[in-house]
DNA sequence: CATCGTCATGCATACGTATGCATTACAGCG
DNA sequence: CGCTGTAATGCATACGTATGCATGACGATG
């Protein structure tokens, strides 16, 4: 009934089991890791498995990693936002990645976001053998990102193109086309686009998509750039256009919501006075999300595909440079 | 200008540097890891550092971990919700943990949430030496959690008590006292409390806090339990009480927001007809958050303290069983 | 009876680092 | 000159696993 070990048995090791059973460590290791290239008597196998169970043996993951040259750990690094209660995007991305890794017997490790640590230290950590591959959310302007694209670490970019590495993104360009056409079909003649700067590749793609669709429809574009998520000036710009806009596409959902709040304050009726569209489809549908008309990107599919590609890279296979995941219109009450 | 290595130099190792410099691996290791117990000639140090720089040496984290018996990786596991765009709570907790780890030169690894993997596999992974310690969000009803509290892995619980391990929580009990008193001071005679089940320890504490405060004020309590976040029945219960309630505390912010939506639909004016209070203070203040009156818990402080305690545990020190972090009233427009 | 193939297991090593102990060289001192 | 102390470095090992190669036993076959 009681354990015949003394005090703290420290770690239970394959060698420990071998000693108890008067077998060699290699036999124990082979049986417990289920190596198919060798054969063992049924009796030995039973004995080993029973003893392992009894002693509570767990193979030491670090030793396995050192021996096998792989850790089964995937890193994730965002060079843009930071994860907190307000960042619905990162929450969705990281959550999806985590579940996907879990399903494949892998682990997700968060690499430091933002620049609390120096780029050099961060780069060193990424290449220190702790992770087998990296999912990256960043852009070309970033020195660390550029350095990574030249390194030997397998990396796949998500939600943004990075030269020199495969990327998986939602259809930012096409999505804006859907948005513009959705509004045009409802008879809106003057459709604007608001954003808070072109730093992200996604934003640039969405702007391009907007401009292309507008040109395609023979409509005059109205780009409105304001400080990050400042809605009041945006609304002012919308209303004070040569001829006030009747509809506006926001570069993402949060921007759209902030604008909606400003509309309430300014007594602008949505969608009667102004139709509003978002982009991302990440908002909690139990709350405000169901009301917002938006373009739903399918982020779990993006991360799923990104991990697929990363695994191919880690296996040494070639991968397509760019993978684009379809988006769809989610019709709410605001447009 | 160009590297004198052939093809792929594989990994640059301390032994590799030693060979180039006709030194021993131990000297290289000692210099590069800055061991203070030994002395080296200034010249040797320069040579080694220069060569390491030139060859792009990065110590192999896995080998270090094996040798030193510690990985500098902290695990996080939530046995309740899953991380996605809707889960503001986990996003905040995980984000705070990550930044705090980063500041201490540690890494945060996400252990599989929910039950996609079997408890047994999960337990094995947790004890496989991959992490030095674990921050846990779970409760006593969970077999895996109970097993962990008996294991040799240092664990600290956050946002919920678990018997057998230290816990760091926000003041759920006292917070509800603040909420009730806030409402009572504004003259509300009939204050209710809505929740979606007592599974979480936090919910139970908040209920206790509510009941205690009500008793203290000599008011009659009204507990309303509905299916998780079903607001319509909750509102019905509120309105159909013997005498309709004038104020209600919701067990968290999301519940409160859903209730607010139901109020709009049912034409109930907030706060005139019904005052509403939330709990957590995690909602995006750029959006709806600033309007909701709520009890702000300071989650970054909770996770910070939890990591402190975990580090003490990992160092073999004793720790207090329970640490409670103060909360405060955030006055919005709903109560 | 000698040879050979197969089965079951053991021996030895490598992954890359950190570190206790040994060694060399040399200066200071009596 | 011999002894001792210290500075600078090397040697050997351990962390725990996986795996190539070798070994012994035994039955089958010529």
Image: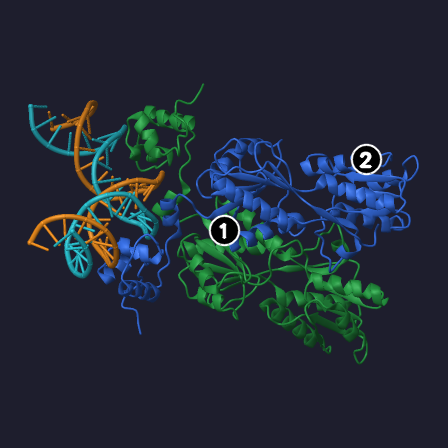
Chain colours: A blue, B green, C orange, D cyan
Secondary structure type for disc 1: strand
Quarter of the figure with residue B37? top left
Asked if disc 1 and disc 2 are in contact, CB closer than 8 Å, the reply is no
Report whether residue A259 is seen.
yes
Q: Residue at x 50, y 36 (%)?
A: A123
Task: Give how far apart the Cα atoms at labels 1 and 2 are.
Answer: 42 Å
Query: Residue B187: where, in percent of width, then height?
Result: 80, 70
A40 or B247: nearer the eye? Answer: A40
Neighbor class of circle 1 (other Cα within 10 Å; few <14, some 14-19, many 20+) is many
Residue furthest bottom as drawn: B242
Query: Residue C14: where, in percent of width, then height?
Result: 30, 40
Q: Judge from the rendering whether residue A23 lies leftward or rightward of residue B33; answer left or right.
A: left
Q: Are marks 1 and 2 on the same chain?
A: yes
A254 or D18: nearer the eye? Answer: D18
Report whether residue A230 is seen.
no
Secondary structure type for disc 2: strand
Query: Residue C25: where, in percent of width, then height?
Result: 19, 24
Q: First in sequence: mark 1 or mark 2?
A: 1
Tag 2, which chain? A
Q: Residue at x 45, y 61 (%)?
A: B121
Of the numbered discs in the image, which one, if any, rests on residue A223? 2
Mark 1 lies on residue = A107
D4 or B46: nearer the eye? Answer: B46
Query: Residue A68: where, in percent of width, then height?
Result: 38, 45
Residue furthest top as drawn: B1
């Amino acid at each position: 009934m009681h354990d015949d070990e003394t005090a703290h048995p420290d770690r239970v090791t394959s060698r420990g089991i071998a000693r108890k059973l008067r077998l060699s460590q290699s036999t124990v290791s082979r049986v417990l890791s289920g190596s198919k290239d060798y054969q063992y008597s049924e009796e030995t196998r039973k004995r080993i498995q029973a003893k392992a169970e009894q002693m509570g043996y767990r193979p030491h993951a670090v030793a396995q990693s050192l021996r096998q040259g792989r850790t089964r750990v995937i890193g994730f690094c965002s060079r843009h936002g930071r994860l907190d209660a307000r960042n619905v995007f990162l929450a969705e991305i990281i959550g999806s990645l985590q579940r996907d890794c879990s399903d494949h017997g892998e682990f997700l490790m968060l690499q430091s976001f933002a620049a609390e640590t120096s780029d050099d230290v961060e780069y060193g950590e990424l290449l220190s053998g702790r992770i087998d591959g990296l999912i990256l959310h960043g852009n070309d302007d970033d020195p660390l990102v550029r350095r990574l694209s030249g390194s030997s670490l397998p990396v796949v970019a998500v939600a943004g193109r990075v030269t020199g590495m495969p990327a998986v993104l939602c259809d930012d360009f096409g999505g804006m086309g859907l948005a513009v056409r959705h509004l045009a079909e409802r008879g809106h003649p003057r459709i604007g686009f608001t954003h808070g700067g072109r730093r992200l590749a996604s934003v640039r793609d969405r702007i391009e998509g907007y401009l292309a669709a507008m040109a395609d429809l023979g409509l005059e574009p109205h780009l409105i750039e304001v400080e990050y998520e400042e809605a009041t000036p945006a609304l002012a710009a919308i209303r004070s256009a040569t001829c006030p806009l009747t509809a506006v596409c926001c570069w993402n959902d949060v921007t759209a919501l902030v604008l909606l709040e400003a509309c309430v304050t300014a007594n602008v009726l949505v969608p009667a006075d102004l139709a509003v569209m978002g982009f991302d489809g990440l908002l909690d549908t139990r709350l405000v999300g169901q009301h917002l008309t938006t373009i739903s990107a399918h982020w779990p599919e993006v991360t799923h595909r990104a991990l697929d590609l990363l695994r191919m890279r880690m296996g040494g296979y070639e991968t397509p440079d760019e993978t684009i995941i379809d988006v769809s219109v989610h019709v709410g009450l605001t447009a």
